[in-house]
Amino acid sequence: MSRNKSQLTGRVKRLVLADQRVGKVAKTSYVAMARAAEVFTCHLFRSMSSVACTYEPNPKILRAAHLKHVANKDEGLSFLRGLPAVARAPDLELDALLEKRELERERERKKPKKRKSSSAQGETKKKKKKAKAAATAPAKQEVEAAKPAPATVAPPAAAELSEDDDYDVE
């Protein structure tokens, strides 16, 4: 079990054992409850991030307003509405966020685009590159042919060795 999983399981165990009505609990139930908490957290995060990405151009922070919006839209998360942090959170102003996003999209559309070269200019550039590559190819082959082959070094024969040499002869 990874370190994060064991920490989460440990927290769940402390919460369960804090209830004095609970006696013994099977070890697998702690793991199951920890996994359920992880799945719930992932679902909540995905919901909040999709709301943030839908209504804001580049969201960097998930706010309590995103959580409140998700809790109001998803009936499975309606129990979150009773939390004080969610109840006090401001409502998400969707109309203002949508207008802001539309303005940013229009600005992007109005930005001058870089001029692309015409197709005739593009073709001449391609022809020049091909001609240059063809001219340099024979020169590269000549240089490689002129290079001497790497010499292989063979160990000296046993007759050439003296007693002072530290060569191991097999």
Image (spheres, rainbow, N blue to C red):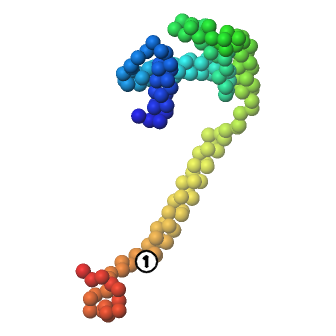
Q: Position of residue 39 (x, y in %)?
A: 47, 21
Q: Position of residue 143 (x, y in %)?
A: 49, 72
On the question of residue 72 being in view, the answer is: yes
In the image shown, does 160 or 162 lie closer to the viewer?
162
Residue that extends furthest to the left in the rendered view of this protein:
170
SS assignment at label 1 = loop
Amino acid type indicated by mark 1: Pro
Q: Quadrant of the C terminus?
A: bottom left
Looking at the image, is 39 positioned above or below residue 139?
above
The residue singled out by tag 1 in the image is 148
In the image shown, does 48 or 96 lie closer to the viewer?
48
Looking at the image, is 124 positioned above or below residue 12?
below
Q: What residue is drawn where x is 57% and y is 54%?
A: 129
In the image shown, does 42 or 150 lie closer to the viewer?
42
Which image quadrant for residue 63? top right
On the question of residue 92 being in view, the answer is: no
Q: What residue is drawn where x is 54% and y is 6%?
A: 75
Looking at the image, is 34 positioned above or below residue 167?
above
